[in-house]
Amino acid sequence: MADLRDTIDSQKDPGADGGSRFGFTRPGREGIPALLVKVLFLGIVIGTAIALTPALVGERSWVFLTGIWVITAVLVATYATGRALPAKYLVPGTLMLALFVVYPIVLTAQTSFTNYGDGTRNDKQTTVDRIVGSSVVRSDDSPQYNLTIATDGDPASGPFTYFLVPQDDPETVYEGTEEGLEEDPEGVTLDNGRVSAIEGYTILNIRQVSDASDALDEIAVPTDSGSFIVRDGTSEAFEGAPTLVYDEDAETITDTRTDTVYTARQQGDREFFVDDEGERLSDQSWTANVGWRNYERIFTDSRISSSFFGIFVWTVVFATASVIGTFLLGLFFAIALNDPRVRGQKIYRALLILPYAIPGFISLLLWSSFYNQDFGLINQLTGLDVNWFGGATTAKIAVLLTNLWMGFPYMFLVSTGALQAIPGELKEAATIDGAGGIAGFRRITLPLLLVTVAPLLVATFAFNFNNFGAIFLLTGGGPFTPDNPTAGGTDILISYTYRLAFGAGGVQIGFAAAVSVVLFVVTGLIAALQFRATRSLEDVN
Amino acid sequence: MRRYARTLGPAAAMMLAMTAAACGGGSGSSSESSSSDSTSSPSAEGGSGGDADLLVWTDSLKIDAVTEVAEAFGESNGIEVEVQAISEDLQGSFVTADAAGNGPDVVVGAHDWMGNLVQNGAIEPLNLTPDELSGYSEKAVQATTYDGKLYGVPYGIEALALYRNTEIVPDEPASMDEAIQAGQAAVEAGEVDSALNLPVGELGDAYHMEPILTSFGGYIFRYDESTGYDAQDVGIGKEGSVKAAQEISRLAKAKVLRTSISGDNSIALFTSGKAAFLVSGPWALSDVKKAGFEYAIQPVPGFDGQQAAEPFMGAQAFMVAANGKNKDIAQEFVNNGVNSEEAMMTLFEGTQLPPAMTAVQEQVDDPDLTVFTEAANAAAPMPAIPAMASVWEPLGKAYSAIVSGKDPVATIRSAGDTINKNIADAG
């Protein structure tokens, strides 16, 4: 014990030799290996930042670029200089907290004020481009041409010329430029219905065509019938024209065949291009800010609010029962196996940890099939004929039983550890004072145990409160009643949210983010209350 | 703290996906600038695709066949191709990656994704000539056409059929009623546990129930030759669906339909000889072949005195991504690399899906696959419209509730109301 205290004391004092072991002290006082590690580490950090910079500049992601260089600067400032010793310990954790906890929460909160989801993933300009760009229609009598793209300049920048041979008339050649089509250009070699060489021109290969595709998109080769030559891949083309035109000033799309004008109008939580009768041009919409609308929907949509309370109660019951059940069972085994009179302690302990060693999703799927009414293991072994997942009560019992099996090894582990940390003298003293057996356990062991275990119980409660996997893989939230297929008998808030957001009607990330923020606040409040309650336990010490 | 970290995992993953999307959205705000960037530094945006000239995404079952076709195309054009298998949620991953500009150039997937992909602006229409299109079975083209435009080149088609264990039921039933009677006789004789393995499950399975619904004149969305499926005309809750619901309830009381039989165990129970009949698709064929008993396959028959059963038909297709880095090469690959008899033959041999190209269909001499081809050609394409997402869950759960003993008429009507409300809510 005294040795340990010495070590702690020497770590507390940065001036003592303890600091140099971590290689983070003033320059000049550290060993060569520590210096090398430091140089290597900072080199990797700076190198990564430099390597990412061109890509981010290319993408114009200025926010990310700034973020990366700020992090780099903070790391270099902290570790390359001898100042700010506490920061050397605090910076990594703080950065991780900011990156993986605070940043996602901020993003979720931001997203919760938008209608982001299926159908609204793009901005308005991209959506308009997509709608208009997809409206190209092949002219009725258009032949399919074999296309050769060539240039008398540079293959990357042009100018480009199209050489076209109709597939149904392989002897005719057209030269297509922005002036139009011209028949029988000079100096052309034909090979198998395709132009294979032109005097004074370089023919672009498939890779060059792909690289030049933006420049090629700018070229409009008009035809006599009023349409254009449209590239179809890299080796073919046809005559066609877009049937939709976007008017930027009026922000309307016009169908040139029917002269129908489509204007952007709100329908539900998003805008669509619709005609006068409200008929949509396309199902494509775009991302927009919707203010508090998602939050309003949580509290005003009758389907959501009607099931919300019942599901909330079951979530609390599920989390509480899971914590208490697993703790009691784990503690029971821990105490039983902690008695020195038990033989083969190690084997029993190893066996009891097995459920914890199997990946959760595998055991959950297995358990799910165990409960099958006609072919499941449980009914076959016990001779029962219970339709476990068919009724809400039996399904809830099944979920709790399975979660008990999944969770008790963890509690067994922490209880065993905590029991062994309780000094033997204390128990001895208690026995001498007359508190043996149950009284000794209740007054001495349990309070000391709870000091260590209580925070873990709170954490387990929070985990089970959002234990999506246990519900989703076991019952899928079911059973469902026919009048409400969105709220099932074993649904907890998170599985219910998942179904609302991703189940019917496509992915609604904005709405899901709003529900997540509400859940975050609820879970946070409950955890805060519980931690306050556990603080009283510390008085025992 | 570790326990907290585990709960935050899914949220963090979602956030990361959205970060990626947001980051891509920012750069795409002026589409011209971002596309000119990609020409100057094609690898700068480099997602997982690296430097390949053509990146294809597919699932892990089809990757070998797709790789073969893509590499043949790459070799004949002198370019680098890369094929990647996305094993989990290919559609969702593709939509997210494409919006972020990290997606593939071509995606291989099911035709019923198209409504969602088009809605998200993730795929581009194709321009095959009418001549080329006539080389495919009519239903395959119908399935891959959305909003009047072709969005994919189909290579495989699939639909449900009826598998029969001929050692238990030797004679081919002419109707569903005959099949069920023969199956029930086998159950009573103690030869099998289940007369007919039609997956229901606790959460319902609207896909496998479709033959029963259509045989009684029910439908999900009204189909129109020129405009496709109409999301405003939902058939659930109307007369045909009510008759189907009553029949489902009757079959459940007779222990033919059971919630204990689901998509997870129906094939395994049949191949272990515990069921007389199985309703499933071509994906069950290899398991059934290995089962070690004689079997026969026929299109799912209708019920006595009712219409023919019409299961859903699905088409697997190659689609061109709207935000790919090599769109021209992608179009070229789909137009000429995939759209050929040779490539279609490779895809058929590699995936063992009934082919979509008629010339390849004629060359297949496997009688089992011919049944599936016929079944697919007689079936109705699964609706690809986004409104279909509002149907699967409520309808499946209604079927499951009816099988569990709920009142069929009230349940199916209430499911119809829910579906209509979902569609209205979805905007």
Image (tube, rainbow, N blue to C red):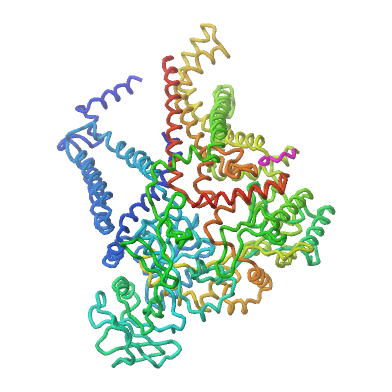
Q: Quadrant of residue A32?
A: top left
In depth, the one of B283 and B415 nearer the eye is B415
x then y, percent, for residue A489: 61, 38
Residue drawn 27% across the image and 49% down it: A63
In depth, the one of B52 and A494 nearer the eye is A494
Residue A486: within the magenta?
no
Against B110, residue B191 (above or below) is: above
Task: Classify the position of the C terminus of chain A by image quarter.
Answer: top left
Q: Quadrant of residue A511?
A: top left
Residue drawn 60% across the image and 60% down it: B221
Asked if one can make out residue A367 in the rendered structure from this viewpoint, the answer is: no
Task: Classify the position of the N terminus of chain A by image quarter.
Answer: top left
- Answer with left or right where residue B306 lies relative to residue A3: right
Asked if one can make out residue A391 in the rendered structure from this viewpoint, the answer is: yes
x then y, percent, for residue A38: 23, 43
Residue drawn 56% across the image and 35% down it: A311
- Answer with left or right where residue A40 lies relative to residue B420: left
x then y, percent, for residue B361: 61, 76
Q: Which residues are magenta?
A: A384-390
Against B332, residue B253 (above or below) is: above
